[in-house]
């Protein structure tokens, strides 16, 4: 079947050798973990939990350190605490991390000055430097991406199970550069209330030390399953059930540009047991979405399929309602998630790719209105963020302006929310969930 968005690998022999090597490496995740995520997502589908999926647009080989991993995790944990505490709804936490390297592109080439170069497709394929040599697809990068994913996942497992995510450290998650802001003040208030609640429970004689949920967090990984050779090389048969799982991450999603019903991405992913996501832009019709549900989840397993609306702030309400109605009437148990980033990308007056914080909030609000009107559950949010103090999205608490984008514009691909904007967003989401 035709596979859209695949790189042009000039050396087929080297590609084959790299994939063969990866196929012999250990899996990154286990089938049982993917099934546990499906079970948690089934709770989201049923309206009993909320999905927070967040992380980088594209992970980088250059920005790879314990600090950058920890800072991303930290802001996601903060957002989850705000959401859980303020809305009383359990939050399922999924990172765009430990494998989110490959990028689909609107065009195969780009003009740099007056030279035409192959587009940058993520560090798993080529380099972002604007030279012809840097843009050649290099299969060794597949191997490097595997190793970086393994180290990242190793550290995430240590942080989430080894004390960093302990709820008694809720105050310690505030980054220094956030500390003096209004978002931090609000966060500190929530953290203090949580501490008081924990003290109260201890005073009542509840064994807090023995309650694992207070000391550890279940954190799952996800990425866009774009490079089918790489995904196939990490697909293994589960010894317990005999089923196939793509062990490159717990959850995989199909992007807006690769969701063709007769394409290779849908065909490949329907054959693995992982929970799946599919991005749905404004052109998705009810008929298409029903066929997609049938193709990817014919058994109607709750938690198996997450539909990710990324329609733009102005379109989401009108475009989404017919889809919600059709899927509901057909009885498909999906998770509905909103990606308020990719339908709201604009070019700043200085020529930077950016997004307005208000547009992001407006798309989320439109998503909630559509669900209220149709009587369905607004199950989750999918955002691009970083723990660093970058200046990539406009607006937010510190009201970032066009001219300030240059200060710390570091993304290799799409503009990400910084830590303050992410926390601000979590409070607005909590407000919507409470209503
Ligand atoms: C992405 O999530 O980074 C992405 C490219 O999204 P979409 O497929 O929705 O454009
Ligand atoms: Co992106």
Image (spheres, rainbow, N blue to C red):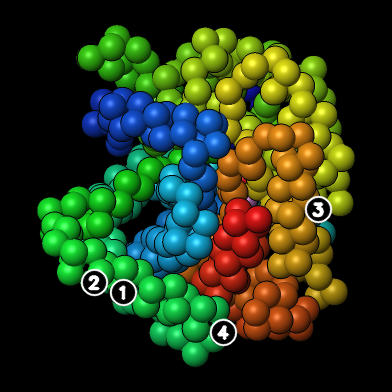
Q: Which of 283 and 61 is in front in this view?
A: 283
Classify mark 2: helix, strand or loop: helix
Q: Looking at the image, do the residues carrying marks 2 and 1 touch, with CB atoms under 8 Å apart?
A: yes
Query: Counting residues from the N terminus, which is met first, the one under dot 3 or under dot 4?
Result: 4
Within-10-Å neighbours for mark 1: few <14, some 14–19, many 20+: few
Relative height, residue 34 to residue 67 (above, below) = above
Would you name the residue on which mark 3 appears? 313
Q: Name the residue under label 4.
A: 182
Going by the image, does 431 lie left or right of 42? right
- Horizontally, is 80 left or right of 207 in the view? right
> What residue is pinned by disc 2?
199
How busy is the neighbourhood of tag 4: few (under 14 within 10 Å), some, or many (20 plus)? some
> Pointers 3 and 4 in contact (CB under 8 A)?
no
- In 3D space, how far apart are the residues under numbered discs 3 and 4 (Cα atoms)? 26 Å
**Which badge, 3 or 1, is on the more N-terminal residue?**
1
Binning the other alpha carbons within 10 Å of mark 2 as few (below 14), some (14 to 19) or many (20 upward) gives some
Position of the C terminus, as image quadrant, is bottom right
Work out how far the residue at label 2 is from the one at label 1, CA to CA, in angstroms: 5 Å
Question: Which quadrant is the N terminus positioned in?
Answer: top right
Residue on which disc 1 sits:
196
Which residue: 69% across, 23% down? 328
| Label 3 – label 2 distance at C-alpha | 42 Å
Give the label, 3 or 2, closer to the camera: 2
Q: Nearer the viewer, residue 426 or 254?
A: 426
Could you tell me residue 351's position as x and y percent?
80, 69
Residue at mark 3 to residue at mark 1: CA–CA distance: 39 Å
Give me the C-alpha separation between circle 1 and circle 4. Answer: 21 Å
């Amino acid at each position: 079947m035709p596979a859209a968005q695949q790189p042009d690998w000039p050396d087929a022999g080297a590609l084959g050798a790299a994939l063969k090597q990866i196929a012999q490496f250990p899996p990154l995740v286990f089938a049982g973990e993917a099934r546990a995520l499906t079970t948690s997502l089934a709770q989201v589908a049923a309206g009993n939990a909320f999905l927070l999926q967040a992380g980088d647009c594209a992970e980088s080989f250059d920005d790879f350190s314990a600090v950058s991993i920890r800072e991303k995790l930290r802001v996601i944990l903060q957002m989850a605490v705000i959401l859980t505490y303020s809305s009383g709804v359990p939050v399922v936490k999924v990172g765009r991390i430990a494998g989110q390297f490959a990028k689909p592109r609107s065009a195969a080439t780009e003009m740099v000055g007056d030279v035409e170069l192959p587009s940058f497709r993520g560090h798993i394929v080529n380099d972002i430097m604007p030279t012809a040599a840097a843009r050649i697809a290099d299969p060794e990068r597949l191997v490097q991406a595997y190793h970086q994913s393994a180290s990242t996942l190793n550290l995430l497992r240590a942080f989430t199970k080894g004390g960093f995510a302990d709820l008694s450290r809720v105050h310690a998650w505030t980054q220094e550069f956030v500390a003096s802001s209004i978002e931090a003040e609000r966060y500190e208030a929530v953290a203090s209330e949580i501490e008081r609640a924990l003290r109260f429970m201890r005073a009542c004689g509840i064994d807090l030390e023995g309650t694992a949920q207070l000391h550890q967090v279940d954190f799952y990984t996800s990425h866009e399953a774009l490079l089918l050779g790489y995904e196939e090389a990490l697909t293994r048969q589960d010894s317990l059930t005999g089923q196939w799982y793509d062990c490159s991450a717990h959850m995989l999603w199909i992007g807006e540009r690769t969701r063709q019903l007769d394409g290779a991405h849908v065909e490949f992913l329907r054959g693995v047991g992982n929970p799946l996501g599919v991005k749905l832009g404004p052109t998705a019709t009810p008929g298409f979405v029903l066929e997609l549900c049938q193709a990817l989840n014919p058994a109607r397993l709750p938690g198996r399929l997450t539909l990710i609306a990324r329609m733009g702030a102005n379109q989401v309400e009108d475009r989404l309602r017919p889809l919600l109605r059709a899927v509901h009437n057909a009885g498909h148990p999906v998770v509905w998630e909103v990606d308020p980033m990719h339908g709201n990308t604009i070019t700043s007056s200085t020529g930077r790719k950016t997004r307005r914080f208000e547009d992001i909030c407006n798309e989320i609000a439109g998503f909630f209105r559509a669900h209220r009107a149709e009587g369905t559950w607004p199950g989750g949010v999918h955002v691009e963020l970083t723990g660093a103090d970058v200046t990539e999205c406009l607006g937010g608490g510190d009201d970032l302006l066009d001219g300030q984008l240059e200060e710390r514009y570091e993304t290799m691909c799409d503009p990400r929310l910084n830590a303050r904007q992410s926390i601000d967003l979590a409070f607005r989401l909590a407000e919507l969930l409470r209503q």
